[in-house]
Image (cartoon, grey):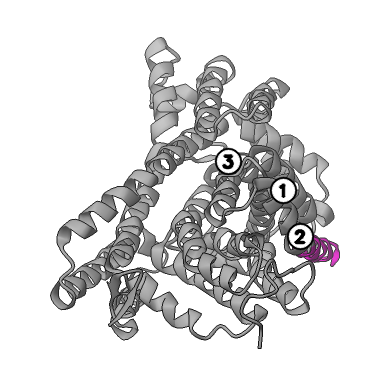
Amino acid sequence: MTERDGKILPHPLIAIIPVVVLIGFLSVVIMLFGSDSLTGGSQIALLMGMAVCVCLSMALYKVPWDTFEQQIKKTLGGVSATLLILLCVGMLSGSWMISGIVPTLIYYGVQIMSPQFFLVSSCVICAFISLLSGSSWTTIATIGVALLGIGHALGVSEAWTAGAIISGAYFGDKMSPLSDTTILASSAAGVDLFTHIRYMMFTTGPTFIITIIIFLVAGLDGEMEAVAHVEEYTQGLSHTFNISLWTLVVPVLTGLMIARKVPSLIVLFVSSLMAGVLALILQPHILCQVAGMTQVSTESLIRGVAITFYGSTAIDTGNASLNELVSTSGMAGMLNTIWLILCAMCFGASLVASGMIDSITGVIIRWLRNRVSLVGSSVATGIFLNITTGDQYISIVLNADMFKNVFRKQGYEARLLSRTTEDAATVTSVLIPWNTCGMTQSTVLGVPTLTYLPFCFFNYLSPLMSIFIAAIGWKIKRSDPQATPEN
């Protein structure tokens, strides 16, 4: 048993038990349920890990239940906006599909985009949009879904497409001054926002260039060719939806809201409402089909719009694969994700309240010897926190809090900590199936996390680049030469 800042911490061997239990339960759940493990089994595993943490803390260290309850309330309160954003993402995904926005983008996209340059184009497009919006989630839920459909029609692997979409979206999110994670990382480390963003270019820039080259080479290797059913896709879409360039008015207005720095939650909600109105004008027959009625009427239109927002939709296009592509799940499709987030937040809160997170990371900090080990430990901790707490926001804050004093004592600038935190905690969250980001993006794109993971080059090269840049010492300065010297 150790003590830090006047707080008694559990022994590291005790602190690691809930994590081991969680990993054990998750392994069993995945083995038993496979791809359905995230529809309930993983949530139970998180709650079991929390239960073990609480029992050990109360029995061995006399931590009162009130401590856990207060931390859970604080944690869930901080994630409430995220839950609303998730619901709006589900609402937007359904409305953009049924209104014809996504079908129109797919219709023209499959005829314009070259299969050879599709991956690199998708990555760059998502990076640009995410940079403007400051939200990888919004980018993936809108243009990302459309690009996935275009890639499917062009015969490009959905795993490669999802990897390109996510890589670009997280680059833009990470570098955008509008991004909540970018703002959070800089503020948590005590660094000016634009100082933080400029400093990230020394690791993020090279990583993104490497990523672009990989997608370019993959597209030019001759294996990705347009398939014969491109024409079937365009015919199916044109016969089912009213394909019109007027549908692009909503994306344009959405872009204007983003440019005017309207909050993401408002953008998603208003964009969904605009898409709903567009569906009433251009796709009344689709709304009638969604409502399960045979004739267009006021009742069928209102019912169709409501179901589009909150429920599942299945449109018959005459093509089985296209039917799957244009199906949506609305707000209801996000409920498993929200359930997972709530359970992940409770598990993370229990680790924080018990002091087990501090105890585990304290072991890592003891082994710090030089610049590389310092940055490497921060990177490893950020990834570890993403795995154990299930949320990038908690990971960012805890990582900055744990290493702030260590970086200062060794004389390194706070901007090194803020950059390292982003390189690890922000971008790797989407690679973990039970993390809020991993679950959300796999749900939105309809591609399992472990399927797209190998192709998210930007996301797993970023922490490696952070360590590499630390090793060569490029643009890394010690703010206090009199601090503890490196070995």
In x, y percent, where is residue 33?
34, 68
Residue 35 horizontal side relative to residue 249, left or right = left
In x, y percent, where is residue 3?
32, 76
Quadrant, the N terminus: bottom left
Magenta residues (range): 206-222
Dot placed on the residue nearer the N-terminal end, 1 or 3: 1
- Magenta stretch encompasses residue 336: no
Identity of the residue drawn at 51% across and 58% down:
396
Identity of the residue drawn at 24% across and 68% down:
48
Amino acid residing under circle 3: Thr
Q: Which mark is residue 208?
A: 2
Secondary structure state at the residue bearing disc 2? helix
Secondary structure state at the residue bearing disc 1? helix
Identity of the residue drawn at 75% across and 40% down:
109
Q: Which mark is residue 138?
A: 3
In x, y percent, where is residue 338?
37, 48
| CA distance separating discs 3 and 2 | 20 Å
Q: Does the image show residue 214?
A: yes
Q: Is residue 452 above or below residue 3?
A: above
